[in-house]
Amino acid sequence: MPLPMELRRDDLSGPEVQALLAEHVADMHRISPPGSVHALDLEGLRRPEITFWTAWRGAALLGCGALKELDPLHGEIKSMRTARDHRREGVARALLEHLLVEAEARGYARLSLETGAQEAFAPARALYAAYGFRPCPPFAHYREDPNSVFLSRLLHP
């Protein structure tokens, strides 16, 4: 029987976490054109308004996700990533559910995100749609971009 998945608040100092994030940023630059990549690097994720979590099964890093406070009532999902070897295991779903619970606990009325418009992002868009995220206009610092899809969901804290 496999070990259960454990979600941890993370300080981004572990080499496994840094490697997963480096892979994430590199993939975003490979898939999306310059100027359309909104993935944060390590320093960007260490900002005080961002909380970062990782998913583990034993010593295996399964994925990560972050929550950024845009204002006291609005949060943004950042850096959702499932490790290549652990896709289709429910990692993204578990992380998203955790971020939704955390956003509601913080009292956010709205949770938003930006993801890619390319086919490679179709599974992510389907997951977000299954959890009630709907298209919205660009928010925060974002601008209209044919390579970006902006999604938002109202919360009920």
Image (cartoon, rainbow, N blue to C red):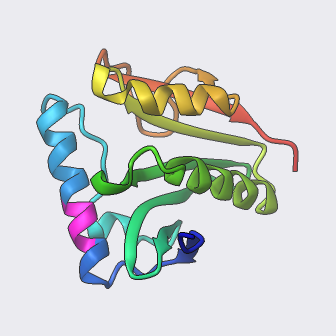
Q: Quadrant of the N terminus?
A: bottom right
Q: With 127 as the anchor, is 115 left or right in this view?
A: left
**In-front residue for pair 69/98:** 98
Q: Is residue 133 visible to us here?
A: no
Q: Nearer the viewer, residue 45 or 19?
A: 19
| Residue 65 among magenta residues | no
> Hey, which quadrant is residue 28 in on the image?
top left
What span is colored magenta in the figure?
Answer: 18-22
Position of 34 with respect to 145 (left or right) is: left
Across and down, in percent, residue 4 comes to 60, 71
Q: Farthest residue in the top direction? A: 146
Q: Position of residue 118 (x, y in %)?
A: 29, 21
Q: Residue at x 33, y 64 (%)?
A: 44
Q: Residue at x 34, y 20 (%)?
A: 117
- Outermost residue on the right side: it is 157
From this view, report whether residue 61 is shown above or below residue 23. below
Location of residue 66 with respect to 96 vertically, above or below: below
